[in-house]
């Protein structure tokens, strides 16, 4: 397909830049919010997007720890803080 090589190269370059930006020695991940309630999770994200314009959303990580019968599913929002 036309342009596929260029698109793949751009994606690879972007992934390499992200890996260098979030490398282990460059900073740490700070937890902003954590919950086990899915509706509370969605509401909090919606409120953050609407009200807090200071957050760099390209430096935000969303983790979903899948639960089992013993441990419920946990949702966590983390922000990368450079050194």
Image (spheres, rainbow, N blue to C red):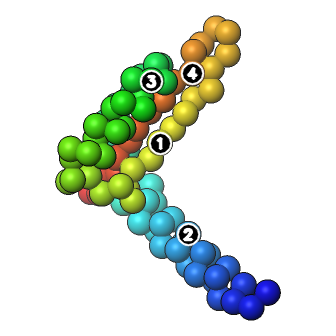
Distance between the alpha carbons at the discs numbered 3 and 4: 12 Å
Near mark 4 (Cα within 10 A), the count class, few <14, some 14-19 or many ≥20, is some
In the image, which disc is placed on residue 26?
A: none
Near mark 3 (Cα within 10 A), the count class, few <14, some 14-19 or many ≥20, is few
In the depicted structure, whether residue 56 falls above or below residue 44: below
In the depicted structure, whether residue 71 falls above or below residue 54: above
Q: How far across and down, in percent of the image, does residue 67 sit?
A: 62, 20
Which secondary structure lies at badge 1?
strand
Q: Which residue is mark 2?
A: 15
Q: Which residue is mark 3?
A: 39
In screen coordinates, is 37 left or right of 4? Answer: left
Which secondary structure lies at badge 2?
helix
For this orientation, the residue located farthest to the right is 1
In the depicted structure, whether residue 12 falls above or below residue 77: below
For this orientation, the residue located farthest to the top is 70
In screen coordinates, is 1 left or right of 83? Answer: right
Query: Does the CB distance between marks 2 and 1 fall below 8 Å?
Result: no
Q: Residue at x 64, y 82 (%)?
A: 7
Q: Which residue is mark 4?
A: 73
């Amino acid at each position: 397909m036309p342009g596929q090589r260029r698109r793949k190269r751009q994606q690879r370059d972007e992934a390499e830049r992200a890996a260098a930006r979030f490398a282990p020695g460059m900073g740490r991940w700070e937890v902003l919010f954590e919950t086990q309630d899915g509706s509370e999770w969605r509401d909090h994200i919606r409120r953050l997007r609407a009200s807090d314009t200071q957050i760099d959303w390209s430096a935000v990580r969303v983790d979903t720890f899948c639960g089992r019968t013993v441990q419920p599913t946990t949702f966590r929002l983390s922000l990368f803080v450079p050194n």
